[in-house]
Image (spheres, helix red, strand yellow):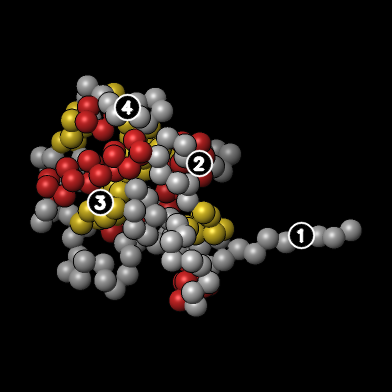
């Protein structure tokens, strides 16, 4: 009987494959718990939501925090996801020396339509286990923002967040860890394809 063993990659091995040109430049990939995962193509509402939200956050947070769109973050030892949006602490070198690590991250935002199940079942536990304090899932399917806070490990060993709050299109939400910045959600949750 043939036994199949899956190869899990470390961050170092993944970066080495990139350096060696193992992947095509147009491939959109993430390293998730040692697996190299092909990212789903973005549908139009997802792209529009990302662009609108980035534009808003850039204007609100200029000089206060670093806003990154679809760029890697480091979660040792074997994950380098590329969230749709990350708000990270200001850093003198603008993260030239390294992608943001968990201690740098103020908020991770994933925008989900076709990836809703993956974002809830794979990315949410990954972010929780890493200790990312605040995670937003902009759920374009149900037209709501799901705000998750306070990562914890459940009694059965899974990872989740203690606080889970739903915001609808008419709501306003404050950005965590950034004083006096709030977002009206209607422009991001009222998109039609």
As drawn, the label of residue 51 is none
**Would you call the spot at circle 1 few (<14 residues within 10 Å), some (14-19), or many (20 or more)?**
few
> Which residue lies at the image location 51% right of the left edge and 67% below the top edge?
23
**Left or right of residue 1: residue 55:** left
Q: Are marks 4 and 2 in contact (CB under 8 Å)?
A: no
Q: Nearer the viewer, mark 4 or mark 1?
A: 4
Dot 4 or dot 1: first in sequence order is 1
Q: Does residue 135 appear in this view?
A: no
Q: Position of residue 165 (x, y in %)?
A: 33, 28
Q: Is residue 12 above or below residue 60?
A: below
Percent across and percent down for residue 173 are 21, 32
Q: Nearer the viewer, residue 47 or 154?
A: 47
Residue found 68% across the figure and 60% down from its top = 6
Crowding around mark 3 (Cα neighbors within 10 Å: few <14, some 14 to 19, many 20+) is many
Checking the image for residue 4, the label placed there is 1
Whether the residues at callouts 4 and 1 have beta carbons within 8 Å, the answer is: no
Determine which residue is flagged by label 2: 118
Q: Residue at x 32, y 27 (%)?
A: 192
User: Distance from label 1 to label 2 (Cα)?
Assistant: 24 Å
In the picture, the quarter occupied by the N terminus is bottom right
How far apart are the two marked residues, 4 and 1, measured between alpha carbons? Answer: 44 Å
Could you give the CA–CA distance between mark 3 and mark 2, rounded to whole angstroms?
A: 21 Å
Q: Check disc 4 and report the residue beneath it.
A: 192
Which of pointers 1 and 3 lies earlier in the amino acid sequence? 1
Q: Nearer the viewer, mark 3 or mark 4?
A: 4
For disc 2, the neighbor class at 10 Å (few under 14, some 14 to 19, many from 20) is few
The span from disc 4 to disc 2 (Cα, nearest Å) is: 22 Å
């Amino acid at each position: 009987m043939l036994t199949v063993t899956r190869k899990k990659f470390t961050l170092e091995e993944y970066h080495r494959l990139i350096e060696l040109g193992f992947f095509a430049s147009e491939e959109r990939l993430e390293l998730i718990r040692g697996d190299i995962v092909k990212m789903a193509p973005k549908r139009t509402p997802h792209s529009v939501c990302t662009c609108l939200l980035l534009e808003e956050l850039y204007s609100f947070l200029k000089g206060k925090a670093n806003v990154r769109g679809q760029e890697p973050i480091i979660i040792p030892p074997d994950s380098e996801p590329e969230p749709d949006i990350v708000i990270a602490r200001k850093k003198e070198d603008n993260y030239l020396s390294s992608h943001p690590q968990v201690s740098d991250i103020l908020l991770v935002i994933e925008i989900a339509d076709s990836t809703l199940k993956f974002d809830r079942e794979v990315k949410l536990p990954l972010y929780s286990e890493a200790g990312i304090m605040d995670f937003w899932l902009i759920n374009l399917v149900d037209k709501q923002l799901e705000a998750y806070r306070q990562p914890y490990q459940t009694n059965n060993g899974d990872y989740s967040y203690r606080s889970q709050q739903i915001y609808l299109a008419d709501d306003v939400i404050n950005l965590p860890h950034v004083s006096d910045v709030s977002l009206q959600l209607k422009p991001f949750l009222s998109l039609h394809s």
